[in-house]
Image (cartoon, rainbow, N blue to C red):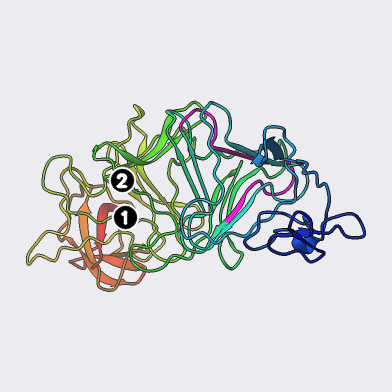
């Protein structure tokens, strides 16, 4: 004993321990592990252990306290970095910038993605900016700049509070070739939307009432609001569609301002309930040209030949190859199918003929003559000694015969006019 205390290599209560062969207190006597306060080793290391920071990890000490902190300001964040999180709520990665700089910027100078985000429930990417700088800036000189996918809600949600700035801006630095800004692909790998420097392409398979590949809705309460406004290089509106369906085309094209083609049904179908009143019509055409020869309607057949024209002064011409060029019908009992005010000029079923002296009959060839045609004759020359009139003595397809009522020959020629009317 020493001073009344026993000496033991195994130690114990109120006992003096004995150093081992290395001159150290046996580790079995140190208060480590559960309930203890000592550290015997760190990752298998014993003795003096030094903690050094690396990358964005800093190590600080204050007395017997060691502090580990994450600092990204030195730009030495080590990659690759991968982490799996099981969060029912909250945000797994959150960056906040209280000044005017960019919150996050991703760049890839190679062929890979600059940023790839995947979510199975919440938003894959949500960015908010209250200043004039982008909330997220992603750039890639070769591959896709941003890829985001989500199986339930929005893959990307962008919000900005800056006046005059876009919540999402797409820009390509390519100066040649196909300059693609946006590509949307469905689950089958088919491109359904493609936005490039040449325009926007939509590829859909919408079916059913109310469905459409492109649907535009203006929720503004203002009546003059538009659904579509197209402007030319001078920023002048050339095409607009209002929320009430009013459509305007302001074209300077030398040809047609509007061309509509259909290979199946009607190319244009107009339906409405126009009320009575001056100037109201289901289809209204007005030619503002001062030229009186300007046309309101010009209809062409498949060969490009004009078959119908209506001039701005109302002059109408029908050029048909059918058996009947114009058919006008009136379903009212006793109604008038056609009413002409003014002179009437006919070409074709009218003409003139001559009954030569000494002849009793004269045959006239005319393609409009039929076996059941109504033929009207008028004498246009004076003849003394005419004791009888003229009549139609025979008619058939392509010709008719004119004869004297009396079997007395004429002393001189007799001229007459005729009009053929077919049923």
Left or right side of 114 for 42: right
Please tell me how crowded label 1 is: few (under 14), some (14-19), or many (20+) other residues with Cα within 10 Å: some
Residue 285 image position (x, y, % from top left)? 29, 41
Q: Is residue 262 left or right of residue 318?
A: right
* Residue 301 percent location from the top left of the image: 45, 56
* The label number, if any, that marks residue 354 in the structure image: 1
Q: What is the quadrant of residue 211 in the picture?
A: bottom left
Residue in view at x 33 percent, y 35 percent: 287
Total tally of numbered discs in the picture: 2
Residue ID for mark 2: 316
Q: Nearer the viewer, residue 99 or 131?
A: 99
Q: Which mark is residue 259?
A: none
Which residue is at 92% across, 60% downward?
Answer: 21
The residue carrying pointer 2 sits among few (fewer than 14), some (14 to 19) or many (20 or more) residues within 10 Å by Cα, namely some
Question: What span is colored magenta in the figure?
Answer: 130-148
- Residue 403 % position (x, y): 25, 65
| Quadrant in which the N terminus is drawn | bottom right
Upstream in the sequence, badge 2 or badge 1? Answer: 2
Q: What residue occupies the far right of the structure in this picture?
A: 21
- Is residue 334 in view? yes
Residue 345 on the magenta span: no
């Amino acid at each position: 004993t020493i001073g009344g205390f026993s000496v033991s290599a195994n130690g114990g209560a109120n006992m003096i321990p004995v150093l081992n062969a290395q001159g150290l207190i046996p580790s079995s006597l140190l208060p480590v592990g559960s309930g203890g306060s000592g550290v015997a080793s760190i990752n298998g290391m014993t003795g003096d252990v030094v903690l050094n920071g690396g990358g964005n990890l800093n190590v600080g000490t204050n007395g017997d306290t060691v502090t580990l902190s994450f600092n990204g300001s030195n730009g030495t964040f080590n990659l690759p970095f991968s982490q799996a999180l099981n969060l029912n709520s909250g945000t797994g990665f959150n960056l906040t910038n209280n000044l005017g700089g960019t919150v996050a910027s991703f760049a890839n100078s190679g062929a890979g993605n600059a940023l790839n985000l995947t979510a199975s429930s919440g938003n894959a990417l949500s960015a908010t900016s209250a200043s004039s700088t982008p909330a997220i800036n992603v750039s890639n000189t070769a591959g896709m700049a941003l890829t985001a996918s989500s199986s339930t809600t929005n893959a990307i949600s962008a919000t900005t509070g800056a006046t005059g700035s876009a919540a999402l801006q797409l820009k390509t630095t390519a100066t040649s070739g196909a300059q693609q800004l946006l590509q949307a692909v469905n689950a089958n790998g088919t491109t359904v939307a493609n936005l490039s420097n040449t325009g926007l392409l939509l590829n859909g398979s919408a079916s059913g009432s109310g469905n459409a590949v492109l649907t535009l809705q203006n929720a503004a309460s203002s009546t003059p609001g538009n659904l579509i406004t197209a402007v030319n290089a001078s920023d002048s509106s050339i095409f607009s569609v209002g929320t009430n369906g009013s459509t305007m085309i302001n074209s300077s094209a030398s040809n047609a301002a509007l061309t509509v083609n259909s290979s199946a049904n009607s190319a244009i179908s107009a339906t409405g309930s126009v009320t009575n009143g001056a100037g109201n019509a289901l289809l209204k055409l007005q030619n503002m040209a001062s030229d009186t020869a300007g046309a309101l309607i010009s209809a062409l057949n498949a060969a490009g030949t004009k078959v119908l024209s209506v001039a701005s002064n109302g002059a109408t011409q029908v050029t048909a190859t059918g058996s009947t060029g114009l058919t006008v019908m009136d379903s009212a009992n006793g109604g008038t199918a056609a009413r002409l005010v003014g002179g009437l000029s006919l070409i074709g079923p009218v003409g003139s003929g001559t009954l030569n002296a000494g002849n009793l009959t004269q045959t006239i060839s005319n393609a409009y003559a039929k076996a059941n045609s109504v033929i009207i004759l008028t004498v246009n020359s004076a003849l003394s000694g005419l004791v009888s009139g003229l009549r139609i003595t025979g008619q058939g397809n392509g010709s008719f015969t004119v004869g004297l009522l009396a079997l007395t020959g004429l002393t001189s020629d007799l001229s007459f006019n005729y009009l053929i009317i077919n049923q």
